[in-house]
Image (tube, rainbow, N blue to C red):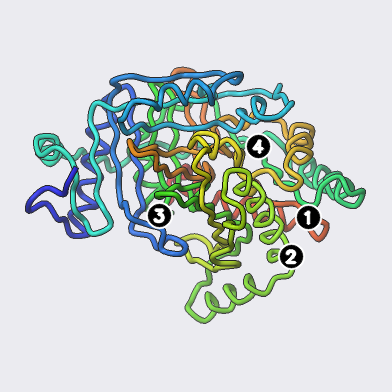
Amino acid sequence: MTPLDNMKLSKQQQILFKQKALQWSSGFDVCMLLDNNFCVNACHLHDVEFMMATGVKRELKCTTGNAFEELKIFQQSSTQIFGYFSYDLKNEIEQLNSSHQNGVHFPDLYFFEPQYFLTIDKEGNIIGDKNLVDEIEAVELINQTKIYAPILMNERVSKSTYIKNVESIRKHIIEGDVYELNYCVEFFANDVELHTPDVYKSLINKSPTPFASYFKYYHQYLLCASPERFIKKSGDKLFSQPIKGTIKRGVNEAEDTQLKNELLHSEKELAENLMIVDLVRNDLARSSKTGSVQVDELFGIYTFKQVHQMISTVSSAIKNEVHIIDAIKHAFPMGSMTGAPKIMAMELIEKYETTKRGLYSGAIGYITPNGDFDFNVVIRSLQYNAASKYLSYEVGSAITFDSIAEQEYDECLLKAKAIMDVLGGKD
C-alpha cells in the first residue's frame, strides 16, 4: 500500500487520530495497536510510527507443544499478521515446565489476520484504506473526567521474601550455576472493573515509549508501555536490542546529565548489559550467516520520560535456508528477561518466582507479507481479564554477584512507577 494523497498528519493530528483509532478499535472483539509515541529508537531503527489491526478474518490460538510449527503454516498466506509469543513457549523450546498460578490466562501463542489495518509511517503519512481513515476521523471522542477510583495492588511476594530470594540467587551465582538471572515479582488485584482504553491513554501519557501496545483479545487485555525491542527483521538483516541498565530521571538538566553519566560508568550495569549482549550474539548466530553477527552499538544511553536506559544493538544477516519463524524461536525467550546461561536461568526462575509469566516477558508485534517482522519485549505492562476482573503487572531486574537486594527491589518499583501512578489516579 502507498500513502494516501493529502493525508500527511502533523504530530498533533497524529495524536488525535491515534486516540480515535483506539476508541474505534476497542469496540471489536480483537484489536492490536502498536505505537512508537514519537520516540527515538536506538540506532534509529524506526520506520513505523503507528499500526492499527482491528477485527479478525482468521486467527491462530495455540498452547505450548507445537505452536511454532502451527504458526509457520498460518503465516504462509501473503497477508500481514499480528500477534504474540508468551514467555511459557520456552517449555516447547527446551525441556522446561511451568506450574505457577496464572490469573489472566492468555493463550500461549496467538496471531490473527485483521479485518481492518492501517499504518502511519515515521513521516506522518497514513497508509491504508481511505474509507477506513474517514470512518475513524469521524469518531467523536468520549472524554471522562474521572475514569476510576484508585486501585490498590497487592504484592504476590513480600519485600522480605524478595530480599531472601535475591540472596539465594546470589548463592547460585557464587556457585557458578548462572552469571545473571532476571528475577520478577507480581502485583495484582481482584474484583477490578477497568475501562482499558482510558487507562492505556493515561499510561502512555505518563510513560511514552517506542514499543507501546494496546491489545484486546476478547475479554483479556494487554496495556503495554515497553521501551524494548526483542527482534526485528528487515530484508536479510536481523536486529535485537536488549536493555540492561536502568536509572531514574533527574529533577533538572544538571542532575539528569549526572545520572546518565553514572549509568554509563556503572561497572555493575555494564557487566549486566555485556553478559546479555554475548547471549544475544549467540542466539542470533544460530540463524545467521557465519561472521555476520556484529554489535552495532554497545552501552547506548537512551532517555525516556520516567527513566534512562542502557540499550545495546546486535545485528546479523539471516541464512537463506532459515525459516523466519525459526529465527524468532532461536532467540526466544529474550536473554534480557532470562539471564545467562539461558536454560539454567529459566530453571531457577521457575524455582524462585511464584507467578506464571504468561504474556509478560513474551513478545508482541507483527509479520509482514514479505517475511519482515518486528516484536517488542512485553514489560512495563498491565494484564487484565475483564471476565474474572483480575488485574496484574510484573516487574523485575537482573540479579548478579554485585546485586544489593534492597537496591534491586527499588529498581523494580522505579520501573513500575508509571503503572502505580496511573492506577493510583495520579496525573
> Closer to the camera, 412 or 298?
298
Which residue carries the number 2 mark?
A: 268
Q: CA distance from mark 2 to mark 4?
A: 27 Å
SS at mark 3 in the image: loop
Observer able to see residue 367: yes
Q: Are marks 2 and 1 in contact (CB under 8 Å)?
A: yes
Residue 400 is labelled as 1
Q: CA distance from mark 1 to mark 3?
A: 29 Å
Q: CA distance from mark 2 to mark 3?
A: 27 Å
| Quadrant housing residue 357 | top right
Which residue carries the number 3 mark?
A: 208
Q: Position of residue 26 (x, y in %)?
A: 29, 30
SS at mark 4 in the image: strand
Of badges 2 and 4, the one in the foreground is 2
Q: Residue at x 48, y 76 (%)?
A: 252
Q: Report the amino acid beneath label 3.
A: Pro
- Relative to 51, say whether 219 is above or below: above
